[in-house]
C-alpha cells in the first residue's frame, strides 16, 4: 500500500500548489494529479454540481489505486464535506490545515480570507477559525476572476491586468488592518507575488496548497503509509480538457518540464462508470 500514489485533485491548475510542496517534503512519493480543466471553474456553480464533480474526481483517483486523496480545492473542501465520510482511503481537504496555520500566524487577531464565491458563501474558513479562536476578527472577499487569470496563464506579477484585478478585489482588505491573509482557493498562491506586492510585507499570506500538503504528510505518517523507497517518486498529471494550456502554465509554476507526464481523461466516461 505504501508504494501506491498520493491522489490530488482540483478543478484545474490550483492543486499544483499542493503538488509543488508535496514534491519538496516527500520526494520519494508517487503522485497522481487530476485537474478537471473541462469543467473549471467550480467556484461559481451550485453546491449540488460541485458535490457531483467532487465525487467523480475522487472516484477517478480511487480507480487509479491511490492510498490517500487530497482535495486540493478550497471550493470542494468547503462545499462537498460529505466526501470525507464516503471514501475507502484517508482524505483531506484544505480548510482545516489552512485555517489552523492562519490562527497560529496572526499576531493582531485580524485575518482576511479570499476564495471563490462558493467558498466565501459557505463560511467554511471563518467557521473553522472561530471554532479554534472566537476572539479573532475575520474579513472575507470572494475573488472569482483570479481563477480565470491563472487558468489562462495570466500569472506574472508584472502583468497590468493581474495588478488591476488584485487592486479591484483587495482594496478594502488593505485598509482592514489584517496581518494574515488566507489564500483560500488553491489557484491563488500562483499569483501570490502580485497579491503580496499590493498588500505589502506586513500581511503574511497563508498558502492553502502548501499547508494542506504538510498536513497530508502527517496523515501518511499516522496511517503508516509513507513510501520508504530511496528513489525519487514520479508524478503523473491527468486533465479533462486539452493538455497544452495546462502544461504551459504548470511548467512555469512548477519550474520543470511536465511534457510527457500529462494525459487527457474523458470525464464523461468516468461519470458513466
Ligand atoms: N482551486 C479551486 C479552489 O481552491 C477551484 C477554483 C474554481 O474552480 O473556481 O477553490
Image: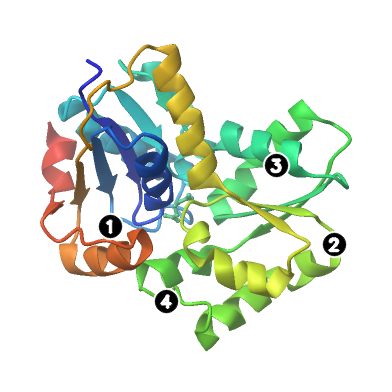
Q: Which element carries disc 2, helix, strand or loop?
A: loop
Q: Residue visible at 58% across and 73% down?
A: 194
Q: Which element carries disc 1, helix, strand or loop?
A: loop
Pick the quarter of the image with the C terminus.
top left
Q: Residue visible at 23% across and 29% down?
A: 5
Residue highlighted by disc 3 = 102
Residue 104 in percent (x, y) is at 74, 36
Which residue is outermost to the front? 230
Q: CA distance from mark 3 to mark 1?
A: 29 Å
Q: CA distance from mark 2 to mark 4?
A: 27 Å
Residue highlighted by disc 4 = 154
Residue highlighted by disc 2 = 176
In front: label 1 or label 4: 4
Q: CA distance from mark 1 to mark 4?
A: 16 Å
Residue 205 in percent (x, y) is at 65, 55
Q: CA distance from mark 4 to mark 3?
A: 27 Å
Residue 72 in percent (x, y) is at 42, 42
> Toward the viewer: 161 or 143?
161
Asked if labels 3 and 4 touch by Cβ distance under 8 angstroms, the answer is no
Residue highlighted by disc 1 = 37
Asked if labels 4 and 2 touch by Cβ distance under 8 angstroms, the answer is no
Q: Is mark 3 within 8 Å of ligand 1?
A: no
Q: Reading the chain from its start, which is encountered first: label 3 or label 1?
A: 1
In front: label 1 or label 2: 2
Pick the quarter of the image with the N terminus.
top left
Amino acid at each position: 500500500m505504501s508504494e501506491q500514489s498520493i491522489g490530488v485533485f482540483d478543478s484545474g491548475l490550483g492543486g499544483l500548489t499542493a503538488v509543488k510542496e508535496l514534491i519538496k517534503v516527500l520526494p520519494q512519493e508517487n503522485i497522481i494529479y487530476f485537474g478537471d480543466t473541462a469543467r473549471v471553474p467550480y467556484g461559481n456553480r451550485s453546491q449540488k454540481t460541485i458535490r457531483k464533480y467532487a465525487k467523480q474526481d475522487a472516484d477517478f483517483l480511487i480507480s487509479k489505486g491511490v492510498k490517500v486523496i487530497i482535495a486540493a480545492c478550497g471550493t470542494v473542501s468547503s462545499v462537498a464535506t460529505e466526501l470525507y465520510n464516503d471514501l475507502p482511503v484517508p482524505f483531506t481537504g484544505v480548510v482545516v490545515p489552512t485555517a489552523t496555520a492562519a490562527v497560529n500566524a496572526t499576531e493582531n487577531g485580524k485575518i482576511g480570507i479570499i476564495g471563490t464565491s462558493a467558498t466565501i458563501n459557505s463560511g467554511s474558513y471563518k467557521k473553522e477559525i472561530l471554532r479554534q479562536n472566537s476572539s479573532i476578527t475575520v474579513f472575507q472577499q470572494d475573488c472569482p476572476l483570479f481563477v480565470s487569470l491563472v487558468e489562462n496563464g495570466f500569472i506574472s506579477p508584472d502583468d497590468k491586468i493581474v495588478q488591476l484585478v488584485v487592486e479591484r478585489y483587495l482594496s478594502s482588505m488593505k485598509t482592514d488592518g489584517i496581518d494574515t491573509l488566507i489564500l483560500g482557493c488553491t489557484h491563488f498562491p500562483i499569483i501570490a507575488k502580485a497579491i503580496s506586492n499590493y498588500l505589502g510585507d506586513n500581511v503574511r499570506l497563508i498558502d492553502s496548497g502548501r499547508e494542506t500538503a504538510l498536513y497530508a504528510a502527517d496523515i501518511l505518517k499516522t496511517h503508516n503509509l509513507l513510501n520508504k523507497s530511496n528513489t525519487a517518486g514520479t508524478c503523473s498529471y491527468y486533465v479533462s480538457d486539452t493538455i497544452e494550456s495546462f502544461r504551459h502554465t504548470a511548467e512555469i509554476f512548477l519550474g520543470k518540464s511536465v511534457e510527457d507526464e500529462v494525459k487527457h481523461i474523458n470525464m464523461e466516461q468516468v461519470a458513466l462508470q
